[in-house]
Structures are given as C-alpha cells and as structure tokens.
Image (cartoon, grey):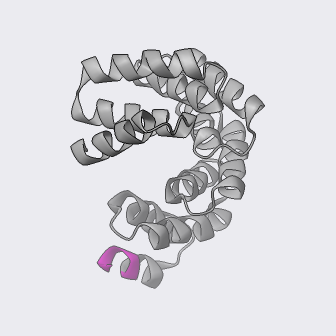
Amino acid sequence: YRAAQQAFSQALAMGYPDPYVFYVLIEQDHAMGDKQAGMRDFQAFNERFPDSPWFHLLLGDAYSAKNDDAQAAEEYRLALKLRPDLPITHYQLGFIAFKHGDYPGAEQQFRQEIAVNPTFGNADLYLGTTLRRMGKVAESIPFLQQAVARDPTDPLAYNALATAQMDTNQLPAAEQTLRE
C-alpha cells in the first residue's frame, strides 16, 4: 500500500490532476490507516474536483463504512448521474438494496454493474444470490458459475454455487463444486 500511495502522490505532484488518482490515493491512505494523509488528500480532492463522480463515489464509500446507507445511496446516485458507466457504483447500490431485502432493486443494480463492469465477480455472486433468494434458482446458477470463474479463491462463491446446485437437485455438480 505504501508504494501505491507514494506513486499516486507523486503522480499528483508531477501535475497529473486526475479525480481517479485522488480516489485511489485516498483508498491507499485508508488501507494503511494513515488518517492524516487521508484527510489532507480528501481536502485537496474536494477543493479540486468537488463535482467529480469519483468524489461522490468516495463519499458514498465513507457513508457506507459508517453504515449510513441512505446517505451512501444518495452519493452513489449522484455519482451515476454524473457518469452512468462508473464502475462499482451500481454494485454498491445493489448491495445496499440486498442488505435491506429489496431483491428486485438489487437484481436491477447488479445487472447494470455486470453490463458496465463485466469482469467484477462480486456482481455475479450477489446477482446469483439475489436471484436464488427470489426463487429463481435455475437462473442464478450461470451467474454463480461466473463468480467462481472470476475468483476461484472465493469460498463464498463456491458455497453459493453448490447450494444452488443442491436446490436444483444437481447433486453430482454440487459435490464437484464443493470438492473444488
């Protein structure tokens, strides 16, 4: 994290003022627990790019970390209003809907995230889990398979896939999934 933090700080210092660079720099500050650098970088980000979709994504993440889902969702929606194809944002809205049992809303957001960011396996995992909770178990399996393919080290993805396979009486496939 320190090397990434230094690289992103250096990019900004060398005159590469990009909102995404600020966003990932502050993520590195947070990962390192460097609150002083995080506040300094946040203030600089706010001064330079207060209307950036990345700034609203950052604010949404901060509210989400404090379990303020209403404010987080508001910031994520502002980010999407500014940039509808912003990665991770539909996923975050979907996850908030999922936590609150709004499965149709979660399904819509996860599907939009997959359309925007097809390589992000967590969107497939949570879409599959959402579909399963909605009783659409057979429809969930391809998404859960995709989640396993995208992150073959995620035990949650394997468990979700095996459970869906068992729910649809695909016992040999479930056994193979659990063995993997």
Magenta-colored span: 176-180
For the C terminus, give its image quadrant.
Answer: bottom left
Query: In which quadrant is the N terminus drawn?
Result: top left
Magenta stretch, overall SS:
helix
Image height check: is 86 above or below 159?
A: above
As drawn, is 16 to the left or to the right of 112?
left
Q: How many marks?
A: 0
Rendered residue at 52%/78% (across/down): 170
Would residue 78 be found to the left or right of residue 127 on screen?
right
Give residue 89's position: percent from left, percent from top: 61, 39
Across and down, in percent, residue 78 comes to 70, 24
**Residue 67 visible:** no
Please determine whether, in this image, residue 53 is positioned above or below residue 135: above
Residue located 65% across and 33% down the image? 102
Image position, residue 120 (x, y; %)? 54, 58
Q: Is residue 74 magenta?
A: no
Give 150 or 168, whichever is nearer the viewer: 150
Q: Nearer the viewer, residue 104 or 149?
A: 149
Pick out the residue farthest to the front: 14
Q: Taking 61 as reference, is 3 above or below it?
A: below
